[in-house]
Image (cartoon, rainbow, N blue to C red):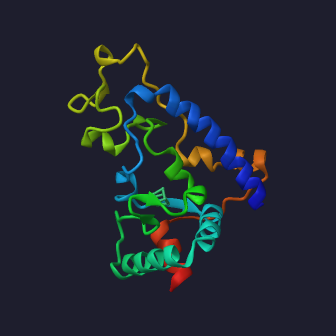
Amino acid sequence: MINRYRDYLEFIDNKLKKMFESQSVYIKCKKGCSLCCKEGEFPMSELEFVYMMLAYMKLSNSLRETVDKQIRALLESNADRLYSCPFLINDECSIYQGRPIICRTFGLIYYNKKERFKVPFCVDLGLNYSDVYNKDTKKIDSAKLIDNTQVSAFNIERSVLRSKKIERSFELFFGEDKTMADWLEEEFK
Ligand code: SF4
């Protein structure tokens, strides 16, 4: 199962890479910017959590000590809404290869059935898509398109990327969904 999940991650990473490239004029993601890791609930399935913990177990002792300290702090804070990810060290993901799906998709606009499209929250901080998104009308300002690059809303909502259809195609079983804090609480209590 883990090998099949790894293949699936490679498959979506390749697709996401092309999506990010197609929107590159609007994307401000760069090394050292970790805002998306500092404010979230980080929902993930059991399979994603297990895979993430495999990456955690491969950390050096000193990195693992830091992560453990941050996990304890998170669990003691009883954070039930938004929190900083305990795997973030010096603004870098310590378990990058094992990060969950939500972390891989963050930064792009995604298609949402109810609202039609969802922009990443960093648009309000002058980052992704801020050059072309009108905060007042909550629409893309077509007069501000850069290099005639159309803004796309990708079908990459988590529910789509961990759907039953995907499970059947890749012979996976994602299992239950919980927030990162809830999974960690269960693992470290
Ligand atoms: S797992 Fe890594 S990429 Fe995801 S929120 Fe945590 S530090 Fe950021």
Q: Nearer the viewer, residue 93 or 75?
A: 93
x 47%, y 30%: residue:
153
Q: Residue 160: which quarter of the image?
A: top right
Where residue 34 appears, as percent x and y from the top left, is 38, 53
x 35%, y 18%: residue:
145
x 63%, y 50%: residue:
162
In the image, is residue 79 above or below residue 126? Answer: below
Task: Name the quadrant of the N terminus.
Answer: bottom right
Where residue 41 appears, as percent x and y from the top left, is 42, 61
Where residue 84 appears, as percent x and y from the top left, is 36, 64
Q: Nearer the viewer, residue 139 or 132?
A: 132
In the image, is residue 78 above or below residue 85? Answer: below
Where residue 63 appears, as percent x and y from the top left, is 50, 73
Residue with the most extreme left position: 136
Q: Is residue 49 left or right of residue 36?
A: right
Q: Is residue 99 left or right of residue 170?
A: left
